[in-house]
């Protein structure tokens, strides 16, 4: 949408007329004006009156909402900017465009910080460089280079996912992976992108990928092993549901040469995280014992920007996320726990809300932001669980713990301490808010007495 000063305006006297003209003069219905200039809206998707034909009031409300969100910056960028429009904030290094300095547009309409142009922001590149300097005085820069390669793979995968429908990348590739899962075209592409990025950085010796049966070994003297699920949640791809990449990074012991050498507990990871390719591409990154930081890909700049510093998961929240379709196969303690939150006892007790996307990255991201619990329990059908220890459970467990949450197995032990016997081993998992996982443990403990 853009607002144009001085454009010929359609003076509409009724919503019906506006509907037929296809253009709107918002100033007629809306007391909001900016610089006293009436506005003409040119966004065809917004002014698609057919969708409002039965609901003129909805159009009115939407137009107010739309203007509230977009007006200040859009309007100003099309007007000549004078020096009186610009004030600088000495502390934030930001430039404020127009307005009267109190968050209002001068018409008493409060606008949010959309008027501020941030000129000092933290990109992932800057974040990594600063972390390297801060934490590791004698760092070689290898880890930072590896993270840059990761970043490249995330951006590239995000790029292809965005264009999947346009470039015929939907659907099956015609192959299966080690687990017998049918591979999607994007599974194969994501896997290739990831592996090539790791190879290209020259700092990685091993890659374990969900899509590759064997350990991948690169020549050279790379000190790191990277474990990954390049496109997690891929069974949802064709429906446009958010998917993501999960990763963990291990520093290798001298002489590490075979798959068993990276069958390590999650406590040995130096970093982990995941990206979620959804409405935007979000990257969640944490380092051993450090904070959890969230970045959002600005596609215009081509940079991940630190948008969610020091993410903390709420202590508790009555949301559960599990595939209830498997409940027939659940063991008694699992059923008991879920019954306890669905049919709580007590006069004021309220049942939990259910939220299950079926794409772990998306369910985990929501859980991280809102709190609650995500679970994929082992059951009678899959006694070892479904999710992979090395590249799904452990990286997510580290994120949850570093954000103040918890992650446990079906036996109630700490997920991060589980040592897989083979690189593709699986486990049941419960992760999320500390207060919620403690409730799971309480039920499990009763069965172990
Ligand atoms: P997917 O098979 O689509 O890649 O990792 C596997 C995973 O998705 C997780 O992302 C998701 O949480 C889970 O499987 C979904 O499994 P169900 O379809 O059995 O619920």
Image (cartoon, rainbow, N blue to C red):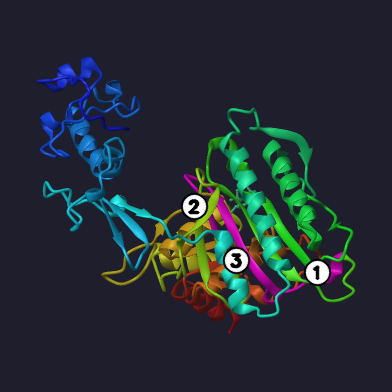
| Viewer-side residue, 447 vs 305 | 305
Q: Position of residue 227 (x, y in %)?
A: 73, 61
Q: Nearer the viewer, mark 1 or mark 3?
A: 3
Q: Secondary structure at mark 1?
A: loop
Quadrant location of residue 147?
A: bottom right
In this picture, residue 23 sits left or right of residue 166: left
Q: Identify the residue position indicated by label 2 in the image.
A: 356
Q: Position of residue 393 (x, y in %)?
A: 64, 64
Name which of mark 2 and mark 1 comes first in the sequence: 1
Inter-mark Cα distance, 2 to 1: 38 Å
Q: Residues within 10 Å of mark 2 (few under 14, many from 20)?
A: some
Q: Identify the residue position indicated by label 3 in the image.
A: 128
**Residue 219 at least partly seen:** yes
Inter-mark Cα distance, 2 to 3: 33 Å
Q: Position of residue 109 (x, y in %)?
A: 15, 48
Look at the numbered discs 1 and 3 and tell me whether their residues touch, using CB distance below 8 Å.
no
Does the numbered disc 3 mark a residue whose Cβ is under 8 Å from ligand 1?
A: no
**Who's the residue at 73% across and 67% down the image?**
142
Q: Quadrant where the N terminus lies?
A: top left
* Residue 272 among those drawn in magenta: yes
Quadrant location of residue 270?
A: bottom right
Look at the numbered discs 2 and 1 and tell me whether their residues touch, using CB distance below 8 Å.
no
| Viewer-side residue, 262 vs 236 | 262
| Viewer-side residue, 302 vs 188 | 302
Q: Secondary structure at mark 3?
A: helix
Q: Which mark is residue 223?
A: 1
The magenta segment:
259-283
Q: Position of residue 95 (x, y in %)?
A: 33, 55
**Who's the residue at 76% across and 69% down the image?**
420
Does the numbered disc 2 mark a residue whose Cβ is under 8 Å from ligand 1?
A: yes
């Amino acid at each position: 949408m853009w607002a144009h000063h001085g454009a010929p305006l359609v003076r509409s006297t009724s919503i019906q007329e506006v509907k037929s003209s296809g253009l709107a003069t918002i100033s007629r219905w809306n007391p909001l004006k900016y610089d006293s200039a009436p506005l003409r809206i040119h966004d065809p998707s917004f002014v698609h009156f057919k969708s409002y034909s039965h609901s003129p009031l909805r159009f009115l409300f939407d137009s107010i909402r739309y203007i509230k969100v977009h007006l200040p910056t859009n309007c100003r960028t099309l007007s000549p900017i004078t020096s009186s429009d610009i004030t600088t904030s000495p502390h934030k290094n930001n430039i404020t465009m127009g307005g009267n300095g109190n968050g209002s547009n001068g018409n008493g309409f409060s606008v949010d910080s959309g008027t501020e142009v941030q000129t000092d922001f933290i990109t992932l590149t800057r974040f990594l460089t600063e972390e390297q300097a801060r934490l590791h005085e004698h760092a070689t820069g290898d880890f930072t280079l590896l993270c840059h390669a990761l970043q490249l793979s995330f951006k590239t995968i995000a790029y292809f996912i965005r264009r999947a429908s346009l470039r015929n990348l939907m659907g099956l590739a015609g192959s299966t992976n080690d687990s017998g899962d049918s591979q999607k075209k994007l599974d194969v592409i994501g896997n290739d992108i990831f592996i090539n990025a790791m190879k290209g950085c020259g700092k990685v010796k091993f890659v374990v990928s969900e899509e590759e049966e064997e350990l991948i070994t690169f020549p050279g003297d790379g000190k790191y092993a990277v474990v990954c699920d390049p496109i997690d949640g891929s069974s949802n791809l064709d429906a446009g549901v958010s998917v993501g990449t999960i990763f963990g990074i291990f520093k290798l012991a001298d002489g590490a040469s075979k798959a068993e050498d990276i069958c390590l507990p999650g406590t040995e990871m130096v970093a982990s995280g995941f990206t979620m390719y959804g409405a935007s591409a979000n990257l969640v990154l944490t380092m051993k014992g450090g904070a959890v930081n969230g970045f959002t890909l600005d596609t215009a700049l081509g940079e991940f920007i630190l948008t969610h510093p020091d993410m903390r998961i709420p202590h508790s929240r009555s949301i559960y996320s599990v595939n209830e379709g498997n409940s027939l196969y659940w063991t008694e303690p699992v059923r008991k726990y879920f019954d306890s939150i669905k049919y709580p006892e007590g006069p004021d007790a309220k049942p939990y809300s259910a939220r299950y996307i079926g794409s772990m990255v998306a369910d985990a991201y929501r859980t991280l932001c809102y709190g609650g619990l995500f679970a994929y329990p082992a059951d009678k059908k899959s006694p070892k669980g479904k999710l992979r220890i090395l590249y799904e459970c452990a990286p997510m467990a580290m994120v949850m713990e570093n954000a103040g949450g918890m992650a446990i197995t079906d036996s109630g032990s700490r997920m991060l301490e589980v040592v897989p016997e083979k690189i593709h081993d699986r486990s049941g998992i419960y992760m999320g808010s500390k207060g919620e996982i403690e409730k799971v443990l309480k039920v499990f403990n009763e069965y172990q007495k």
